[in-house]
């Protein structure tokens, strides 16, 4: 088994304190420091790339309608943007002011490697692979499509199998059962079921907009029962040209708020799917109303760890921000203004003496843990109910090996023995593979803060030049479990990482 794709991001905050972020691109697990680590100084970890500037649909409630440059982003620009952010980028979500399924190079967007297109002196194109292929391989690529008002062909759906995550726009809660909407979405899910095994299995996430008055979930539950659906994402309503003055936000009063989250709990129990909220809606999720993983809920990361780049090439903190910024350095120093998000109701707005909704500003946790694909086209999403991922790595470093070697008379007698010469099953890790395993290990730990500190110590040693290996089997002896420790099976010269029982190599 080859090592897992991942990314190790090394960054310093404004006070000079070093922070390590671990990302697993295969299992879509992301772990970073919280508390004082409030923004990535070196670059965004998540990118919402607005490749679409043109749209064939005319949705009345689209908040991006006023931002259409009417030209889609060229593929050469897509490649250049992602390449320039390759060192810190973990996930990219393709969206914009239109439906990416209409993008001419959709098949290329989901490919593992990007192509550098250069022009020679004669103006002819020269196609060359980008350097740093490992960094590009460690970027998960996601896309969101809108099948509500149209039917797609199999050829249009086929490229979706190349993405890590596919978002399905379902419109407003309570309106999924509208004319043709439910049938078109169901048709797409059936089509994805036919193509998802061609290359990989993308995670399919249903996107649902939460209007100010809540809504019913019966149609959503029927769609959630489809075998290809992996999760549900709840999105806050955004301001559009057709937003009515009476709209007061995603919840009108506290009773509506309580009813909504009670319904969400029922949906989760019935579907057994992870439920996510976007950061715009997170403040309307009060901890008293739904049990959540506090490590997955944190302040909005727009302009701190994520950014939006429009089809015209301009960078915004997010797609519903107030104005563009020059670059990432300006983004992390610009306060986020959510001009595109409807404000919650106030006491003055509420009718019949009802109380306004409860607002909760989620604090920065000690360790941020996110699972799942970034398919949202406005801000990163956080799964509040995560899938279990059993993964534990056991580490034995050089000092521990020396202590055991001194107790081993046989090895002391034969100083010529070198484990790496006598066993060809010791595989060297790259820094990014190490990060991939650390992400899963920390996310699965019952003590993630302490576990991250332990692994951070080894990460520092790796950055200083220590080699790291993992054990795929104990020697060539038959009947020896591949993860059973034997003192003789640890190199006296290297750090060895063991895999847990149940892994296949």
Image (spheres, grey):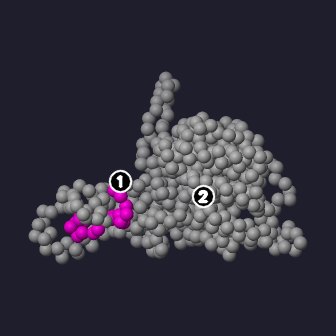
Q: Residue 246, image x and y in percent?
A: 86, 59
Based on the picture, tell me whether residue 491 belongs to the magenta stretch.
yes
Q: Which mark is residue 274?
A: none
Tell me what residue is drawn at x 30 percent, y 56 percent.
427
Name the chief secondary structure element in magenta. Answer: loop
Quick check: can you spot residue 140? yes
In percent of width and height, residue 316 lies at 65, 51
When the figure is inspected, residue 305 is found, relative to residue 367, above or below; the finding is above
Q: Quadrant of residue 231?
A: bottom right
- Relative to 367, say whether 102 is above or below: above
Residue appearing at x 85%, y 67% in the figure = 349
Q: Nearer the viewer, residue 313 or 147?
A: 147
Q: Which residue: 53% across, 64% down?
A: 387
Q: Nearer the viewer, residue 251 or 230?
A: 230
Dot 1 falls on a residue whose secondary structure is: loop
The span picked out in magenta is 484-505
Report the residue marked by disc 2. 231
Give left or right: position of 178 versus 137.
Answer: right
Is the Cβ of the residue at disc 1 closer than 8 Å to that at disc 2?
no
Looking at the image, the residue that sits furthest to the top is 122
Residue that carries the numbered disc 1 in the rendered image: 1
Query: Is 416 displayed left or right of 55 in the figure?
Result: left
- Element carrying mark 2: strand
Image coords of residue 371 (percent x, y): 54, 61
């Amino acid at each position: 088994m080859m090592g897992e794709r991942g990314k190790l991001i090394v960054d310093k905050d404004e006070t000079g304190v070093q922070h390590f972020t671990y990302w697993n691109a295969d299992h879509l697990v992301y772990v970073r420091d919280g508390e004082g680590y409030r923004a990535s100084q070196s670059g965004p970890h998540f990118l919402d790339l607005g490749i679409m500037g043109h749209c064939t649909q005319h949705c009345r409630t689209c908040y991006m309608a006023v931002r259409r440059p009417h030209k889609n982003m060229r593929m050469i620009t897509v490649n250049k943007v992602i390449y320039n952010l390759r060192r810190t980028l973990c996930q990219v979500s393709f969206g914009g002011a239109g439906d990416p399924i209409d993008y001419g190079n959709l098949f290329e967007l989901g490919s593992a490697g990007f192509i550098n297109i250069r022009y020679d002196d004669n103006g002819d194109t020269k196609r060359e692979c980008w350097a740093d292929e490992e960094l590009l391989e460690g970027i998960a690529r996601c896309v969101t499509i809108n099948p509500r008002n149209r039917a797609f062909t199999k050829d249009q759906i086929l490229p979706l199998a190349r993405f890590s995550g596919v978002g399905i726009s379902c419109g407003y809660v309570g309106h999924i059962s509208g004319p043709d909407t439910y049938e078109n979405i169901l048709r797409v899910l059936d089509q994805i079921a036919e193509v998802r095994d061609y290359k990989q299995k993308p995670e399919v996430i249903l996107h649902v907009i939460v209007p100010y008055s809540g809504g019913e979930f019966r149609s959503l539950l029927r769609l959630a029962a489809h075998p290809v659906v992996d999760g549900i994402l709840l999105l806050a309503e955004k301001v559009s040209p057709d937003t009515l003055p009476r709209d007061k936000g995603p919840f009108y009063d506290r009773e509506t708020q309580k009813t909504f989250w009670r319904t969400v709990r029922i949906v989760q129990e019935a579907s057994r799917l992870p439920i996510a909220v976007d950061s715009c809606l997170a403040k309307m999720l009060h901890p008293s109303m739904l049990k959540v993983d506090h490590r997955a809920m944190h302040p909005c990361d727009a302009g701190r760890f994520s950014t939006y780049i429009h089809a015209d090439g301009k960078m915004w903190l997010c797609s519903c921000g107030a104005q563009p910024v020059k670059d990432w350095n300006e983004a992390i120093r610009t306060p986020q203004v959510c001009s595109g998000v409807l404000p919650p109701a106030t006491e003055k707005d509420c009718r019949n003496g009802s109380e306004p909704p409860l607002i909760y500003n989620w604090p920065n946790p000690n360790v941020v843990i996110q699972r799942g694909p970034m398919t949202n086209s406005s801000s990163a999403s956080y799964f509040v109910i995560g899938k279990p991922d059993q993964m534990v790595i056991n580490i034995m470093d050089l000092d521990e090996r020396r202590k055991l070697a001194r107790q081993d008379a046989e090895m002391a007698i034969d100083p010529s023995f070198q484990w790496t010469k006598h066993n060809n099953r010791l595989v060297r890790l790259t820094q990014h593979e190490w990060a991939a395993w650390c992400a899963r290990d920390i996310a699965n730990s019952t003590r993630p803060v302490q576990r991250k500190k332990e692994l951070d110590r080894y990460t520092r040693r790796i950055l200083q030049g220590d080699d790291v290996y993992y054990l795929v089997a104990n020697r060539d002896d038959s009947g020896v479990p591949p993860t059973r420790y034997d003192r003789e099976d640890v190199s006296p010269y290297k750090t060895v990482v063991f895999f847990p029982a149940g892994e296949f190599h």
